[in-house]
Image (cartoon, helix red, strand yellow):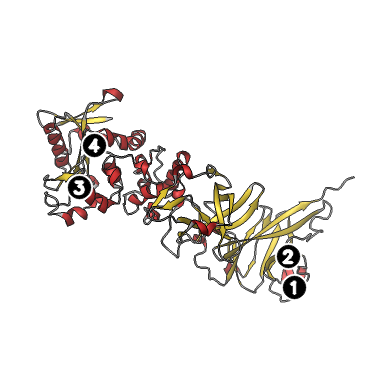
Amino acid sequence: MRLLRLEDDGGFSLEECFGGDIPRYAILSHTWGKDHEEVTFQDLMEGTGKNKAGYRKLRFCGEQAAKDGLEHFWVDTCCIDKSSSTELSEAINSMFRWYYNAAKCYAYLSDVSNGGFPENHRSFRESIWFTRGWTLQELIAPSEIFFYSKNWETIGTKSQLVRPLEYITGVDARVLRGADPGICSIASRMSWAAKRVTKRVEDRAYSLLGIFDVHMPLLYGEGERSFIRLQEEIMRTSDDQSLFAWSSGDSICQPYSGLLASSPAYFTDSGKYSSIGLLNESRPSEMTNKGLCVEFCLQSYGREPGLYYARLECECAQTDEQPAIILQHISELKYGSQYVRVMADVLDTFKPTFFFGSINGTVYVRQNLFPALQPSRFVHVQDDIDLFWIRGTTDFQFPEPIPPVQWNEQTGLFGMHQGHIGRMLVTHRARKNRTICLLFTFWQGKPVCLLEDSQKLASHPEADDISGFGTLSQYRLWTDFFPRSGVFATARVNQVQVNLRRFTVVTLCLKTITERT
């Protein structure tokens, strides 16, 4: 790590320190002002930055460290060369340890006007220091923290302020007194960060690495994916299913989700859930290309077909109740069933007796359903419209969907009012002079489709009469498409229902019968 020294002439110098050669040092915890007001690594290298507002923080930290008998100190704004992605990644993955090993930690609360807690209780409680993502680990890691007001007046120490700090931050008092954060469940630790913010969305995840004792590469630009990756790393070392005990808190959120939350904010009300530790006898969870493989106890969700409560192997700290999420069955695999989480705003709790008679099973829960069926792609679709996803090989072309306003060529989605028949002209690249008509609708509650080879219908797909419409899911439809080679076209449909919205996948394909001579 790189440490600062306050020189006799009042200037600062930087020293590189490694491993066992790292001296005792002080460390600063603070919230950043505007970027151009903070002293950077480049400023120290070039001898500039003395007129910046952040320079006062460096001087105070250096002078206070000297009073405490420490020659070295660390400040994040200028001890990290942020132009180096390698150094930045190493620093962020080491940050918790650096704060943990510091001999002294000074927390500068720039918006608290006076020292002397508790006279300034409201000002202290409402400080932005308690709302920032990075300061959470800076509160937890050091063995002791000395809080200072904007005028560098002493407010108090962490050990003196345990109770108000617990009330303000939600962090368990045992952890504030020095216990390992791992004594608290994953959901509980996530709840500490739920209301905190960071300038960059990725830092919501990166600022939590030390609290969960995990490491991972930094990929700025990945957005919410960083928080998904954090949870995947946590699963590698923990079987605590409270990781799944979150709710979106928004009844109009997307109709499906995976088991992993997209934001720490989803854990706002999850601090009450505790791990059951060694009592968790479920099989290990693992990420696969079919979804997150996990063992759940499943109980039917009322009389809704395909919906189940999945009990989480954790419990409410105040009661003996266990939380349960809602899963929707979407397909059957050879080695297990595939599900998605639905109604993510719901996280119910039940007495253990509720799950009497339920079944334990290994399931695969998809984090994403199908890209073309993501709700963000058809947010303007009305509830009374059925959505057909038209899939075909590159051999097929769809020159004239009827009506064209209901067709989204980019996603392959065709919206159709209930009770109506959707129609699309289909051509083959090798036989553009031949056109067939794809028809699809619901018959007796089941999706059906037909490739109609009637040239009249193909030429006039708006015609009312439709001959030969059947109810099976697959047909040998056009044997004269390529008569000599025995090629014929088929259409197949299958249906996925997610949170009361129905998606029908229509797949077009060519099949070839090889003629023996």
Q: Amino acid at mark 1?
A: Ile
Secondary structure at numbered mark 1: loop
- What is the crowding at mark 4: few (fewer than 14 residues within 10 Å), some, or many (at least 20)? many
Q: Which residue sits at x=22%, y=44%?
A: 30
Q: Earlier in the sequence, mark 4 or mark 2?
A: 4
Q: Which residue is mark 2?
A: 450
Residue placed furthest toward the right: 517
Comparing 419 with 248, the one in front is 248
Image mark for residue 161:
3
Image mark for residue 78:
4
Q: CA distance from mark 3 to mark 1?
A: 78 Å
Circles 3, 1 touching at the beta carbon (< 8 Å): no
Q: Amino acid at mark 3?
A: Leu
Comparing 212 with 220, the one in front is 212
- What is the crowding at mark 3: few (fewer than 14 residues within 10 Å), some, or many (at least 20)? some
Residue placed furthest toward the left: 9
Q: Position of residue 198 (x, y in %)?
A: 31, 49
User: Quadrant location of the N terminus?
Assistant: top left
| Residue 222 in view | no
Q: Amino acid at mark 2?
A: Leu
Circles 1, 2 touching at the beta carbon (< 8 Å): yes
Secondary structure at numbered mark 2: strand
Q: Earlier in the sequence, mark 3 or mark 2?
A: 3
Q: Nearer the viewer, mark 3 or mark 4?
A: 3
Comparing 161 with 405, the one in front is 161
Q: Which residue is mark 1?
A: 466
